[in-house]
Amino acid sequence: MRCASPNRGGPAAGRWEACLAAPPNPRIGPWFRLLKSIADSHNLTPEFEVTLEATHHGPITNAPTMFVEIGSTEEYWKRQDAAQAIALLVWEGLGLGGGDAVGDWSRNCFQQKILLGIGGGHYVPRHMDIVQKDGVWVGHLIAGYSLPMEDPGPSKSQANLEVGGTWKQAIRVAFDTTRAAFPQGEVLAHLDNKSFKGWQRNAIVGFLAEKNIKVGKPSDFC
């Protein structure tokens, strides 16, 4: 069971082709935690793993958007118990039963911090470790495969190295659309440092500083 934001993908729906992305839905973090709770209470775990996914595939919309999915194969898609859990997530998440909606950014959530995940694999485990904690808001999550960086060869040890590739555009679009989805919030980048080589990490940190995008530690989001 997964929650994810869409973009326009390239090969295998992975790369940020033309660097287009929908604004992430602010409900992703709160609904991810609610889905984990529902899956646990309905004895769907550990058979089903509840996870986030990196931003990938379309469609591109102007409205804040998210996917909530059951599994990856037809075997799981037809599971009634899993479908009921997703239906309950939507019912409770939108407040259709009379309770408060879950993850409504417009309800006194201004000035809070939002995690913009950079790096890691498709299921973004290091970013997800933070988002599992109550009160954490999350925007786009960019997997390492969506950050093409041209290896500079022997010059990679130089300071202020210019690294080619479309990684800058991907980060910029992810930041801009996340900021648009969370009015008056503070978007902080969270790097999966272990997923990058030293020269890659230095290039990304330098670019973030150039664009005045702050980098947050795990404790900054809790």
Image: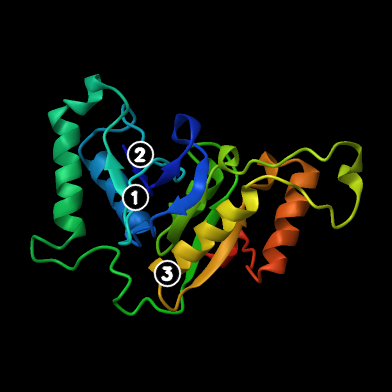
Q: Which residue is mark 1?
A: 32
Mark 2 Cα-neighbour bin, 10 Å: few <14, some 14–19, many ≥20: many
Look at discs 3 and 1 and give the one toward the viewer: 3
Cβ atoms under marks 2 and 1 closer than 8 Å: yes
Q: Residue at x 28, y 38 (%)?
A: 69
Find numbered disc 3 in the image and state the secondary structure of the residue it sits on: helix
Q: Of the residues shown, which amino acid type is indicated by label 2?
A: Val
Residue 199 lies left or right of residue 167; in this view the side is: right
Quadrant of the drawing holding the N terminus: top left
Which mark identifies residue 180?
3
48 vs 98: above or below: above
Task: List x then y, in percent, for residue 40.
Answer: 28, 40
Task: Give the CA distance from mark 3 to mark 1.
Answer: 21 Å
Task: Give the CA distance from mark 2 to mark 1.
Answer: 8 Å
Q: Which residue is mark 2?
A: 50
Residue 105 lies left or right of residue 74; in this view the side is: right
